[in-house]
Amino acid sequence: MGTALGLFSSNYTFYFMLSWLPTYLQTERGFSLIAMSQLATLAFAVNAVSAFTAGWAIDRFLARGGSANIGYKSVMAVAHVGSVVCMLAMAVGSPKLALVSVFVYQALCGASSPGVYAMCQILAGRALPGDGWEFKTPSAISRGSSRHGSRATSSKAPGISRTPSWWLRQ
C-alpha cells in the first residue's frame, strides 16, 4: 500500500507538470505560448539538477551510516507536501507567485525522484530471492538456459539489496 501511494504521488506530480500545468498557466494565468515553453524548459532543467543533487546528498547520507528509510522517506514526504503547497499557490496566487511556485515545485519533484524506486526496494527488504542482475541473450532465452546471460551485481548502496535476478529473467 505504501509503495502504491508513493508511486501515485510521484506520478501525479509529474503528469501535473507535464500535461495540465502548461495549459492552465496559459489560459488562466495569461502566459504566452513562447513564454510558457521557455518556462517549461527551465523548470524541467531545475527538476533535473534537483534530482541529481538530492540523489548525491542521499548517497552521502547513506555512506555516512544514515538510515535509508530516513534518507529517502523524509525527502519524499517534504517534497510531496511542498508540492501540494506549490499547486495551491499556482492556482490562487498572483502570476509572479505562480511563476516562483513552478520552479519550487520542480525542485521538490526532482528531489523526490531518487526515492521513487529505492523506496520500493526498501519496503521489500533485503531478504529477496536471487543473487543479482542477470541479462539473457535472445539465444539463451529461446534455449531456456541461464548460463549464457551476462551478470552484473552490485550491493554498494547501504540499506538497499540487489535487484532479484528472477525479476529480470521474465
Image (cartoon, rainbow, N blue to C red):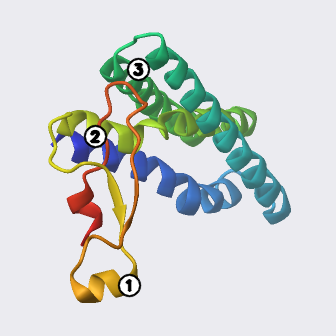
Mark closer to the observer (1, 2): 1
Q: Could you tell whether 74 is left or right of 15 in the image?
A: left
- Check the picture and name the quadrant holding the N terminus: top left
Badge 1 or badge 2: first in the primary sequence: 2
Q: Residue at x 78, y 60 (%)?
A: 37
Task: Please tell me the numbered disc located at residue 71.
Answer: 3
Mark closer to the observer (3, 2): 2
Q: Residue at x 40, y 78 (%)?
A: 137
Question: Residue 23 appears at what percent x and percent y?
Answer: 63, 62
Badge 3 or badge 2: first in the primary sequence: 3
* Mark 1 secondary-structure assignment: helix
- Check the picture and name the quadrant holding the C terminus: bottom left
* Mark 2 secondary-structure assignment: helix
Q: Amino acid at mark 1?
A: Pro
Q: Could you tell whether 125 is left or right of 13 in the image?
A: left
Given residues 117 and 146, the one toward you in this image is 146
| Residue 31 visible in this rendered orientation of the protein | no
Q: Could you tell whether 37 is left or right of 70 in the image?
A: right
Bin the neighbour count of mark 3 within 10 Å (Cα to Cα): few under 14, some 14-19, many 20 and up. Answer: some
Q: Quadrant of residue 56?
A: top right
Badge 1 or badge 3: first in the primary sequence: 3
Q: CA distance from mark 3 to mark 2?
A: 14 Å
Question: Residue 71 appears at what percent x and percent y?
Answer: 41, 20
Q: CA distance from mark 1 to mark 3?
A: 39 Å
Bin the neighbour count of mark 1 within 10 Å (Cα to Cα): few under 14, some 14-19, many 20 and up. Answer: few
Labels 1 and 2 touching (C-beta < 8 A): no
* Mark 3 secondary-structure assignment: helix
In this figure, which residue is indicated by the disc labeled 1?
A: 138
In this figure, which residue is indicated by the disc labeled 2?
A: 121
Question: Residue 33 appears at what percent x and percent y?
Answer: 79, 65
Question: For the image shown, how many numbered marks are present on the structure?
Answer: 3
